C-alpha cells in the first residue's frame, strides 16, 4: 500500500475512544479519523485499547490525529521520518515511496 508522504512514524496507544498517546504524548483522534490495520481495513479505536502499535499517522489542521496506518513488519523496516523537522532534512522518492536521510 502507499503511505502518504506527509505521514509520520510513531508509536500509538489508544487510551479511550477518542484519546490516544503518540510517542508518549497525549492527543485526540480528530472527528472522522480512520485507523487502518495491516490489511488496510478500518478498525474501531476501542478494539486496540492499550496496545503499543507502530504506525504512520497524519495530523489535521488542529494537530489532532486524523489518519493512522498500523504497519506491517515490512513497512516497519522502511526508514520514515518521526517528526516534521526530520522530514525536512530527508528526501522522499515519490516513485519508490521511500524516504532517505540526506
Image (cartoon, rainbow, N blue to C red):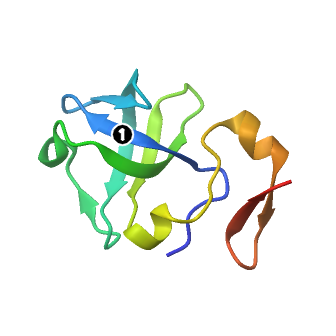
Q: Residue at x 55, y 72 (%)?
A: 2
Residue 95: image quadrant is bottom right
Residue 98: image quadrant is bottom right
Is 11 on the left or on the right of 82, as rendered?
left
Q: Residue at x 55, y 36 (%)?
A: 60
Is 94 on the left or on the right of 77, as rendered?
right
Q: Residue at x 14, y 41 (%)?
A: 46
Circle 1: is it few (<14), some (14-19), or many (20+) Cα within 10 Å? many
Q: Residue at x 40, y 41 (%)?
A: 11
**What residue is shown with label 1?**
12
- How many numbered badges does the structure rendering display? 1
Q: Position of residue 49 (x, y in %)?
A: 16, 39
Q: Position of residue 28 (x, y in %)?
A: 37, 26
Is 5 on the left or on the right of 33, as rendered?
right
Residue 26 higher or lower than 95, as above or below: above
Residue 40 higher or lower than 55, as above or below: below
Q: Position of residue 93 (x, y in %)?
A: 78, 70
- Helix, strand or loop under label 1: strand
Residue sitting nearer the eye, 29 or 25 = 25
Q: Position of residue 21 (x, y in %)?
A: 35, 28
Residue lying at the far top in this picture: please name it. 26
Residue 33: image quadrant is top left
Amino acid at each position: 500500500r502507499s503511505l502518504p508522504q506527509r505521514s509520520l512514524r510513531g508509536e500509538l496507544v489508544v487510551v479511550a475512544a477518542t484519546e490516544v498517546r503518540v510517542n508518549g504524548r497525549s492527543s485526540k483522534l480528530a472527528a472522522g479519523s480512520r485507523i487502518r490495520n495491516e490489511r488496510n481495513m478500518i478498525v474501531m479505536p476501542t478494539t486496540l485499547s492499550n496496545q503499543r502499535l507502530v504506525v504512520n499517522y497524519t495530523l489535521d489542521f488542529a494537530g489532532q490525529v486524523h489518519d493512522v496506518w498500523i504497519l506491517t513488519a515490512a513497512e516497519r523496516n522502511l526508514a520514515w521520518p518521526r517528526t516534521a523537522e526530520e522530514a525536512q532534512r530527508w528526501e522522499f522518492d515519490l516513485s519508490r515511496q521511500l524516504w532517505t536521510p540526506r
